[in-house]
Image: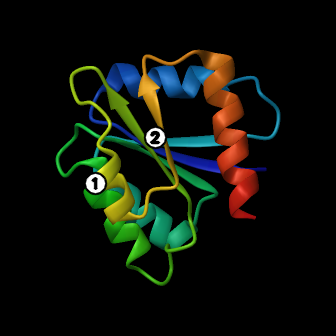
Amino acid sequence: MPKILAVDDSATMRQVIELTFRGLEGFEVKTFDSADQAFQHAESSGADLILADASMTPDGYELCKRLKDNGATASIPVLILASQQTPFDAEKAKAAGADDHALKPYDTNTFIDKVRTVIAAAK
């Protein structure tokens, strides 16, 4: 069962992510409101994918770099979540080692397909 860690400083967005995967067989989603909490959980318990908000502090790019620089978490794929207010920065994503990105708000089916693709590519 793929384990997804979603980190976003917006409680609404965390709920949206949980609702996106609720009822889909085979997914376990844990949400966090801070990059530090998500990092600690990933380091101690692992994950199959991390969804990281580009606009939180520290931002998803910083969290991604921290994960990729740590031997215990380096292989976990990271998908950056960007928005119109905080557009996706391809240069920062590449420098951080991000595996992909998605734009908020997202089409549910397209987002689920992207998540599945990123998880499958990492295996």
Residue ID for mark 2: 31
Q: Which residue lies at the image location 17% right of the left edge and 46% below the top edge?
A: 57
Amino acid type shown at disc 1: Lys
Q: Amino acid at mark 2?
A: Thr
Residue 29, placed above or below residue 73: above
Give the label on residue 29, or none. none
Residue beneath the point at 57% across and 72% down: 75
What percent of the width, then of the height, locates residue 33? Answer: 31, 41
Question: Foreground mark, 1 or 2?
Answer: 1
Dot 2: within a 10 Å radius of its alpha carbon, few (fewer than 14), some, or many (20 or more) residues?
A: many
* Position in image of residue 20 (x %, y %): 61, 22
Task: Name the mark on residue 92.
Answer: 1
**Disc 1 or 2, which lies upstream in sequence?**
2
**The image quarter in which residue 21 lies:** top right
Please tell me how many numbered marks the rendered image carries.
2
Give SS at disc 1. helix
Say how the picture is coloured: rainbow
Residue 36 appears anywhere in the view: no
Percent from the top left, x then y, of residue 48? 64, 57
